[in-house]
Image (spheres, rainbow, N blue to C red):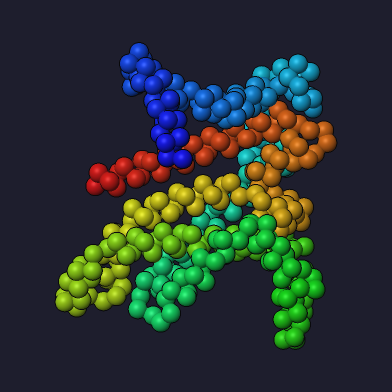
Amino acid sequence: MAVFLNSCMRIIEIPMLYLQQKLGISKLAWVFLLPNLLLFGLFAFLPVVLNLVYAMTGSDQILLEDRTWVGMGNYNTLLSCKDFLDPNSCTDDLFWRAVYNTLSFVLLQVGFMVGFALLTALILNSKIRARGFFRSVFFFPVLLSPVVVALIWKWILQREGLANAALEGAGFDTINWLLDRHWAFFWSVFVSVWAHMGFYTLILLAGLQAIPRDVYEAASMDAATPLRTFRRITLPLLMPTMIVVLVLSLIKSVQTFDEVYAFTGGGPGSATTFLIQYVYETGFAGMPRLFGLASAASILLALVLVVLTFLQLWASRRNANG
């Protein structure tokens, strides 16, 4: 068997050495990269180009030859508002409701996510019993599928669910958690924080453990209070990690779709309809299917994500350069 394998390797080496001599190392590398680049262009770059083209066309037909050219018409439809603070004054009021819902969700989710993740990381980094167990418990929701998380909490919060059973047992009136727009939005934020907080807690915990212990020992010798130690030592040294967590959570919250869609379906009404769901329903689930409008909305969303990504790179480089 070994003799056979050696023979095969020699057969492969002969043409490889010939190509290396003729093309050189750099050109030979491009020969091997070319199939992957072609696949990348076919399945990644080409859809982006088609999306840009679709955003400039109208009609509900999927074939480009059956569609009509409208130029910037789809963008004008999305961005036309008499008062941007009032969705009812916009040409496409559902798009702007989705924008406002997404912005509100991002602000609340990121704020609570980073705050609770930092608090949890500080507790798990302290000298408490069963730290390994609690670290596993807080990270466990991250391992669950977003749809599974949504269905678990939907079962808890439904009219005959566990939450209302607890309220009824305590003598309180039951609440239609998912049929009230304010409660539905609150629980959408809560479920998202619960599901993803463990991931950011783990990142912050790694950042805390990377801080040299002798810095804390010097602070204790100077009789620094825990609050002063946190403000003067922990927070400044943890700031690069905090920025990474902040930007990652921003990008993740803007892209929220599956768990909220499975949890509330965007309702009641449009109370929990976010931008990704708007793109999906406008382009694929609605009748007529407005591919052009959905493509334009997805491009605007992609621009936001690009800005957030560059923000992360800029912040990381700024902290690296001091």
- Horizontal relation, residue 89 to residue 5: left or right: right
Q: Where is residue 253 in the image (x, y as percent from the top left)?
A: 56, 51
Nearest the viewer among 86 and 314 is 314
Image quadrant in which you'd find residue 99: top right
Nearest the viewer among 266 and 98 is 266
The answer to whether residue 314 is above or below residue 26 is: below
Q: Residue furthest right?
A: 287
- Horizontal relation, residue 250 to residue 76: left or right: left
Total labels: the figure holds 0
Q: Which residue lies furthest to the top in this view?
A: 22
Q: Where is residue 163 in the image (x, y as percent from the top left)?
A: 71, 75
The answer to whether residue 225 is above or below residue 25 is: below
In this orientation, does residue 322 appear? yes
Image quadrant in which you'd find residue 15: top left
Q: Which residue is drawn at 76% across and 16% down?
A: 65
Q: Which residue is drawn at 69% across and 66% down?
A: 152
